[in-house]
Image (cartoon, rainbow, N blue to C red):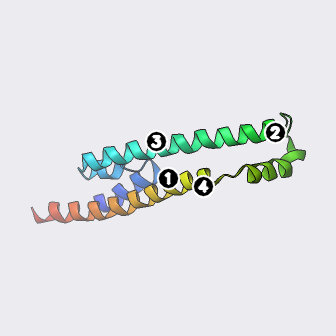
Amino acid sequence: MRRAIVSPLLSGLVIPGLGQIVNRQVGKGAMMVAAASLLFMLTLGFAFHEISQAVLALDGYAGPDKIGALRAQLIKQGVGWLLTLGGLTAALWIYGIIDAYKGGRARDAQLAGQ
């Protein structure tokens, strides 16, 4: 029961794939860590780019009085790719938690049978 609890917590709270590594699924875990890292960096980079472009379109100033204008500019630019990357990151994170739980449960059963 120990791995069935620890593995999903590691995948959910730290990074997807870490629970798989704890469950001795090192290849799968390494691929998930790499994919999650890449998706996170792409999402962060794209968000920074889109927000900076929106701020530049507002004459380089986006103070508290221009939040509505900044939001409108972001919608005008279209943030579909940002939503897609964010959705893929969330889907990978959820898959990592579920898979770590199932793998931990199977590993606990295997260890109990020995």
Is residue 5 found left or right of 89 in the rendered image? left
Q: Picture quarter containing residue 2?
A: bottom left
Which of disc 1 and disc 2 is earlier in sequence?
A: 2
Q: Residues within 10 Å of mark 4 (few under 14, many from 20)?
A: few
Q: Residue furthest right?
A: 65
| Residue 57 tag number | 2
What amino acid does circle 1 point to?
A: Thr
Q: Amino acid at mark 4?
A: Leu
Is 41 in front, or is 111? 41
Q: Which amino acid does the dot numbered 2 rest on? A: Ala
In the rendered image, the vertical position of residue 59 relative to residue 103, given as above or below = above
Give the CA distance from mark 3 to mark 1: 9 Å
Q: Which mark is residue 38?
A: 3
Residue 58 in view, yes or no: yes
Q: Amino acid at mark 3?
A: Leu
Q: Callout 2: helix, strand or loop?
A: helix
Q: Which mark is residue 83?
A: 4
Sequence-wise first label, 3 or 1 = 3
Q: Whole-percent x and y of residue 67? A: 83, 48
